[in-house]
Image: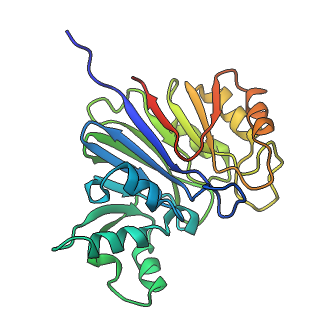
Amino acid sequence: MQSPDRSLRVDVLGAGPAYTDRPGSTGAAYLVRHGQTTLLLDLGQGSFTRLAAAIEPSRLTAVVISHLHADHFVDLVALRHYLRWEFRPGRRVRVIGPAGMADRLDGLHAEPGFTAEALDVEVQRPGTTTIGDLAVTARKITHTDDSYAVRVALASDPDGPGLVYSGDCGVADDLAPLIRPGDALLVEVSFGAGPVVPGAAHLDGPAVGELAASTRPGRVLLTHLQMGFDEAATIASVRARYDGDVVLVHPGDGIDLFA
């Protein structure tokens, strides 16, 4: 009997923080695919271009936004324009995000209803939602007043291996309930080898390493490294505490999980 397909494909469209001097390091955006389901986690500044190169954007099953900082959601404006003006009639995409997201987008253009012309917005809540062939479990975490990390697994096997995406997170232990042994952990490491500036509500390598050591994901995918922090030292600071696979992802990377 042929074993079921458990694979998840992750394309890193953008992995950058709010500002950077790394050429091509656009805002956070990660395309997750299984079968016919295409799920986009965040859509930060400049990443629509890579999205459009990866798939025809109106084919997205849904977009999930972790929080309302521009480096994680502002290219929803580009997606909205594309859906509204590239087609006759226009097309629509489902978007799940924090409360007030539609108002924030409308406010950018001082145009009530701007968002609703092309995006079907739903408010994110803690718990599990089925999106195509995927089960997406959201958990509120420390960052903004309404920030979420998510775990993505197959809807047919939600207890099987999954991808945990941190978004931006100020307390590493907030992520622990989402992580199951063997999962892939896609986690921000904004402050490199550390330390985190007081009040910044972000993570560094030592915090990620300690989280991974206690929860035992199968691999750790580091992202969102801020300008001025050394990549090799960041990876080493995680490996000093966690003996599993650790890499820093970059825009353009494609990763096949659980194949």
Please state, as top left, top right, bottom left or bottom right, where the N terminus lies in the image.
top left
**Colouring convention used in this rendered image of the protein:** rainbow
Q: Is residue 89 visible?
A: yes
- Residue 249 % position (x, y): 60, 40
Residue at x-position 64% and y-position 22%: 244
Q: Is residue 13 left or right of residue 223?
A: left
Q: Quadrant of the C terminus?
A: top left
The single residue placed furthest to the top in the displayed view is 1
Q: Locate residue 36, reporting x and y percent.
A: 24, 41
| Residue 144 falls left or right of residue 49 | right
Number of residue marks = 0
Where residue 84 sits: x, y (%)? 27, 75
Which image quadrant for residue 200?
Answer: bottom right
The reply to whether residue 126 is in sight is no
Q: From the viewer's side, name the closer residue of 205 and 257.
A: 257
Picture residue at 79% right of the left edge, 34% below the top? 237
In the rendered image, the vertical position of residue 5 relative to residue 127, given as above or below = above
What is the quadrant of residue 59 in the picture? bottom left
